[in-house]
Amino acid sequence: MNSINVADDVEYEILPILRVYKDGRVERLVGTEVIPPSFDPQTNVTSKDVVITPETGVSARLYLPKITDSSRKLPLLIYYHGGRFCVYSPFHPAYHNYLNTLVSKANVVAISIDYRRAPEHRLPTAYNDSWAALQWVGSHCRDGGGPEAWLNDHVNFERVFLGGDSAGGNIVHNLAIKVGRDELHGLNPYGIALVHAYLWGLTPIGSEAVDPVKKANVDYVWPFLCPSSPSNDDPRVNPFAVEAPRLEHLKCKRVLVCVAEKDVLKDRGWLYYETLKKSDWEGVVEIVEAEGEDHVFHLYNQTTEKAHDFMNTFAHFLKN
């Protein structure tokens, strides 16, 4: 992310992803492509879109693998996309293709959540939308009484996973903490996956200060997203802040933390893993690091050997 540049008709811009004009217009420079739901013949995965909250427009894309035994219930992955809370959606080709492959490899049902984005909807809107989506999924836990047949008919609600990359990984952490405090129709996540999660803080750790430009760019993100609480030590972005809930309160049994060697967020992922492993949390946490790779590399080019390795790691986590 580059610094703000103010032109005559531009209020601010965050290059190379976003430009906001003085008249309120928002121009997204990446992540605007969309692809419709479909049957994918390469993976035998079928997808469709559903509206979760008509009042706000929160929706999702559902994925169903090839069903060979209709009596067998499958794990469910609830996925939250990345994009700095500003860009991309579940309907972008990269996410659509990625979920098709993951659903096929892991043999799971998946639902990819379309939360509202900044700057039109500053935080905590994305958290509220994501929680509403989780409540909607939870409404299917009780005797198959939810509104979506795919969830009623095919999901084992004892094996629900939350997963997300970048901003989505941040959402997953916060949801897993919140589930431990609030009633959710009996829905208790079995596991969570934080993929290159956007976690930060005021005081640099590890290698974060090595590249001042990268650090400055990340320093700006949270104040832009959440002007009502602009500190990078807000507990929602810094799980290690003094006022943050302790990680042992995570409501799940398994955690997968994924980091990339060249990602400026890498050391926060390692700290998350090490802190959780040393805590009183009663679960299993594992971490994988992609050598020589940068932030969400697996989405930008899904055909590389390391992208395949990561896909297999994620699929294995969902199977076990």
Image: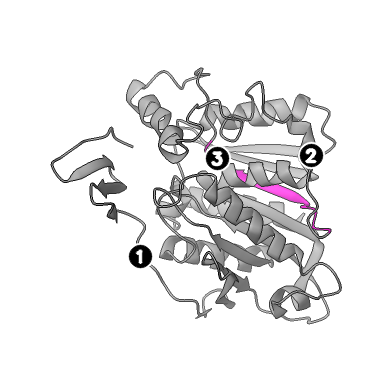
Callout 3 crowding tier (Cα within 10 Å): few <14, some 14–19, many ≥20: many
Residue 262, percent from left and from top: 44, 32
Q: Which mark is residue 33?
A: 1
Residue carrying label 3: 197
| 190 within the magenta span | yes
Residue carrying label 2: 284
At 67% from the left and 31% from the top, the residue drawn is 273
Q: Is 114 rendered above or below residue 211?
A: below
Q: Amino acid at mark 2?
A: Val
Q: Amino acid at mark 3?
A: Ala
Question: In front: 142, or 271?
Answer: 142
Task: Classify residue 197 as left or right of residue 136.
Answer: left
At 71% from the left and 55% from the top, the residue drawn is 161
Q: Is the magenta region chiefly helix, strand or loop? A: loop
Magenta part of the protein: which range?
186-198
Mark 1 vs mark 2, CA separation in Å: 38 Å
